[in-house]
Amino acid sequence: MTSHDSDQLNWGPEQLRHALDAAGVAMWSWDVDTDVFVMDTQGYRFWGVTRNGSLSFEDLSAKIHPADRDRVRAAFSATRAVVGAYEIDFRILAGDEVRWISARGQGNDAGIRNRNMTGIFLDVTGRKHAEEGHELLAGEMSHRAKNLLAVASGLTQITSRSSS
């Protein structure tokens, strides 16, 4: 396949949807005037909400982990002043489950159409759990290394006292 052939691929809605689902990506649109938030099926699944009735940013904010809520609200309010792409990671409460979401979009009204901002939500729960595991392991390794150094230092002091 030449590079020219790849330009001729037919990226239909079905292929794009399959790729987004496989990547754990949800699309969203936010009407900045009416505060109506719309997502694809994957987005509603991520957040544990239904399509019944309208959904506002405040409705979604209630599902953001309390420790992240103010930071996320401030970031979403600031997105229209940010030039270029933005990304923020935060936790949401979907039922009994805590899920990590990365929200990505374009700021400074770039690409805005009919006063609708668009972007994606990416489920990064697996990555965050792996990072937490690595941090825990690194902390444990550091603690054990300090203990070994303390033992070695103690042995050195005892040996230096007993030798003439």
Image (cartoon, rainbow, N blue to C red):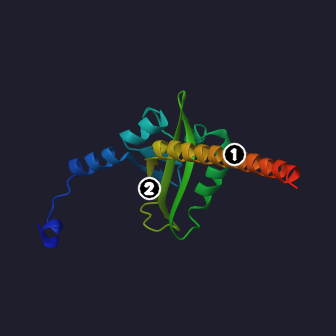
**Residue 3 horizontal/vertical position (percent):** 17, 71
Q: How far is the residue under mark 1 from the one under mark 2?
A: 42 Å
Which residue is rendered at x = 44% and y = 32% of the image?
50
Which residue in the protein does label 2 denote? 119
In this view, 40 is above or below 12? above
Which residue is rendered at x = 53% and y = 50% of the image?
34
Please tell me in which quadrant of the rendered image residue 45 appears: top left
Mark 1 vs mark 2: in front = 1
**Residue 60 horizontal/vertical position (percent):** 55, 41
Between 22 and 54, the one nearer to me in the picture:
22
Between 70 and 102, the one nearer to me in the picture:
102
Please tell me in which quadrant of the rendered image residue 67 appears: top right
Quadrant into which the N terminus falls: bottom left
Residue 49 visible in the current orientation: yes
Residue 56 visible in the current orientation: no
| Horizontal relation, residue 9 to residue 41: left or right | left
Q: Residues within 10 Å of mark 1 (few under 14, many from 20)?
A: few
Which residue is rendered at x = 44% and y = 64% of the image?
112
Circles 1 and 2 in contact, beta carbons < 8 Å = no
In this view, 45 is above or below 31? above
Please tell me in which quadrant of the rendered image residue 123 appears: top left
In this view, 95 is above or below 110? above
Which residue in the protein does label 1 denote? 143
Q: Residues within 10 Å of mark 2 (few under 14, many from 20)?
A: some
**Residue 32 horizontal/vertical position (percent):** 53, 55
| Horizontal relation, residue 15 to residue 43: left or right | left
Between 141 and 15, the one nearer to me in the picture:
141
Q: Secondary structure at mark 1?
A: helix
Q: Amino acid at mark 2?
A: Gly
